[in-house]
Image: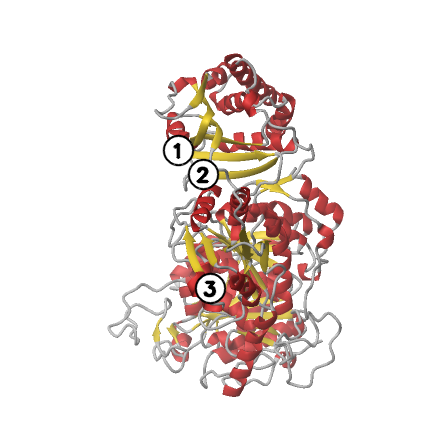
Amino acid sequence: MISQLSWKIGGQQGEGVESTDRIFSTALNRLGYYLYGYRHFSSRIKGGHTNNKIRISTNPIRAISDDLDILVAFDQETIDLNAGELRPGGVVVADAKFSPVIPEGIQARLFAVPITAIAEELGTSLMKNMVASGASWALLGLPLEVFNKAVEEEFGRKGPAIVEKNVEAVKRGAEFVLEQAGGPLEEFKLEPADGTQKLFMIGNEAMGLGAIAAGCRLMSAYPITPASEIMEYLIKKLPKFGGTVVQTEDEIAAVTMAIGANYAGVRTMTASAGPGLSLMMEAIGLSGMTETPLVIVDTQRGGPSTGLPTKQEQSDINALIYGTHGEIPKVVVAPSTIEECFYDMVEGFNVAEEYQVPVIIATDLQLSLGKQSCEPLDIESVRINRGKLVTEELPQLEEHRMFKRYEFTEDGVSPRVLPGMKNGIHHVTGVEHDQEGRPSESSINRQKMMDKRMQKMDSIRVKDAVKVNAVDPSAEVLIVAMGSTGGTIEEARARLSKDGIAINHITVRQMHPFPSELIEPHLKAAKTVVVLENNATGQLANLIKQNVGYHDKIRNFLKYDGTPFLPSEVYKACKELN
Amino acid sequence: MATFKEFRNNIKPNWCPGCGDFSVQAAIQRAAANVGLEPEQLAVISGIGCSGRISGYINAYGLHGIHGRALPIAQGVKLANRELTVIASGGDGDGFAIGMGHTVHAIRRNLDVTYIVMDNQIYGLTKGQTSPRSAEGFKTKSTPEGSIESTLSPLEIALSAGATFVAQSFSSDLKQLTALIEEGIKHKGFSLINVFSPCVTFNKVNTYDWFKENIVNLEQFPEYDPSNRVAAMNKIMETHGMLTGLIYQDKVRKSYEDLAVGFKEQGLANQKLDLSREDFDKLLAEFK
């Protein structure tokens, strides 16, 4: 029996690849397996090759796999494009309709199932995905009733007749392939899972959930790949808590509306990707200058310009840190796991209010969209901290005085009152201002105000600003990374460890202000530092060089072809260094 | 109860003597008092430009944001606390050039915000360039041979975008302007009030006297029905947009706040933030 397996389904976009993947993985989740998904898709709705891959394991997994065990193909193109990934002895389940052929040199077993024919016999070719998934499920020897339950949930709202037909399609696909194969394939028999259902979601959903837990009740946003799921989730959920989502006319409206709402006292977020973040830069400066809390999610994708909208990249970091004109205090955090997507939203909202600064939570496409098992999330650990928000009654102001919203304080953070509060009137402006918010061009005031705002940066450290994944004094190589690559590195590290090679691994989670003091000891101890990132210029490596040093030890390991790193690539690179 | 004096502060506006914006400031202060507001119940959100400074000259909560974005900020404030009265204001460049996209969509969205545009047909703070409201042939620093672009008609645009309240006034007519701002504040939905507010320094054509000669007050037409959208559009076109008064009001359409399903009736800003264990478990159940 095996402990893990990779399954992929491919076809033309709009052919049911997504829904098949959804049902297949839901059923696996019910059985208690750990799952990690990867979507290959294009920026179009119908047509064009698309595929979804799921890695199934009895142990926690946080990376895509190097190879593939089972490929379900709706067309020959799917086979041609993906067969190379199959490990020797892998299986292709394909529609007999197109007379599938395994490309030369690929050792794989082919099961040609009359997928379309069976579906049409049952009434509609739309059900071919159910025939195909039923067939591949049956080959794994997994209980059919669990799969049927997932089918029922998917189609339940369409009525019992539709459910029944789809269940029949699954059954027919299963029967056909089992007869052809002579029963379930022994070599693909998975060890039973622990039977406990895991949370199974994408990073964008975890962030939406985190926002609700953090008390966020408004979102203003403009649709963009790969951020839209956050807004779609909150559109469904916020009205249940009295809030709403506004789909704005553009990202400038999205961010400025969020600033207005935060100013007026509601935890409000926006979310976008690179192009939208570029449009938001001026407004982020307004948030920093007026010390108005703000939370923005940037789901990084391939840039620049429209770039690769549906592909993996980590190339916005420089823009997020340096993009705004002038100098403001700002926080950039990059979660590295699905659980962190949840908790970082909570902390993001807290930091934004405690320090009265803009906070950017930067994910990457694979973390935002890769559907995966998630450890239990703990609402009891969620603490809401609104910082120096004044809630008690204020004394009457002297005539013609205003509330000192920008009072000079020891830590640079001033008391904040919300509009509506008696005796709290003050002015807010993006123009340089005095303690009451009145415009001021005084040199002395300017310098003091700049110092006050920038001073806030000194003490900001989010939880696990630098996460230590592995520290072994005997290791000579240290890998430094950010975002979704952590699981891949950990997998490579485990393989290297089997070879007797120890590697250290840290994840930089707080990108700005840069937690140099937490990184420095690791760099000091290492002989070679490999900075692994999905961009072409080594943005994280450059941040380390700029803030920490050790230029001579640092090697770039870059991938910017739109696909995530594979464990084997990291393994190979590290092996060569040792 | 607050009088208009309570809406004054001691900050001296940096407007030129004779600027039309002084009267707009006074009209907002009077209207706020007349509708019974206390200073802390009002938030004035303004854009950038000479007129954008107005939020700092009224004793109320105020936010002076970035160029062209007064409206989205103001809408955010209103969404966060619908118990506040929210006025957005700025110039014609702010609202009809850089911010035109927001203006059209704020009109469509119909949140209960009153938008007061100080329209002087020129860019003042940058010292005299053409505006979308400048007349064709108008000579400015940026159009030395005269403007060759057509003049934008905000009133027609507002009507075609589905506005529920469209009015226009003249800063010399403090009484009418104050009354229209009061009506705008009371209107349940988005109200656009465009105000001819002459720039005495850079616009030597569209002067106080020029407006007095050219504008038509709707009071002259007792039969005029501001609930008739077609008549409103006709009147705007007949007068080439040089009319003042309440041009159109739709009292039936509900505001965004009232249409948004589930949206809290009290100010969201006064909510409790904590999520109960029970609610959280319900949310989690969907991911199993």
Same chain letter for marks 2 and 3: yes
For marks 3 and 1, the one nearer the N-term is: 1
* Residue drawn at point x = 59 percent, y = 65 percent: A293
Instruction: For mark 3, name the chain.
Output: A
* Residue drawn at point x = 48 percent, y = 32 percent: A68
Residues under labels 2 and 1: Cα distance?
13 Å
For marks 2 and 3, the one nearer the N-term is: 2
Location of the N terminus of chain A (image quadrant): top right
Same chain letter for marks 2 and 1: yes
Colour logic: secondary structure
Instruction: For mark 1, name the chain.
Output: A
Identify which amino acid the numbered label 1 is placed on.
Gly
Residues under labels 2 and 3: Cα distance?
31 Å
* Residue drawn at point x = 46 percent, y = 15 percent: A117
Q: Is residue A95 left or right of residue B150?
A: right
For marks 2 and 1, the one nearer the N-term is: 2
Task: State the residue position of label 3.
Answer: A543
Q: Are marks 3 and 1 in contact (CB under 8 Å)?
A: no
Q: Can the viewer see residue B193?
A: no
Q: Which-is-in-front pick, marks 2 and 3?
A: 3
Identify which amino acid the numbered label 2 is placed on.
His
Task: State the residue position of label 1.
Answer: A47
Q: Position of residue A26 (x, y in %)?
A: 60, 32
Task: State the residue position of label 2.
Answer: A40
Q: Which-is-in-front pick, marks 3 and 1?
A: 3
Instruction: For mark 2, name the chain.
Output: A
Q: Is residue B66 left or right of residue B210?
A: right
Q: Pick out the residue farthest to the left.
A: B145
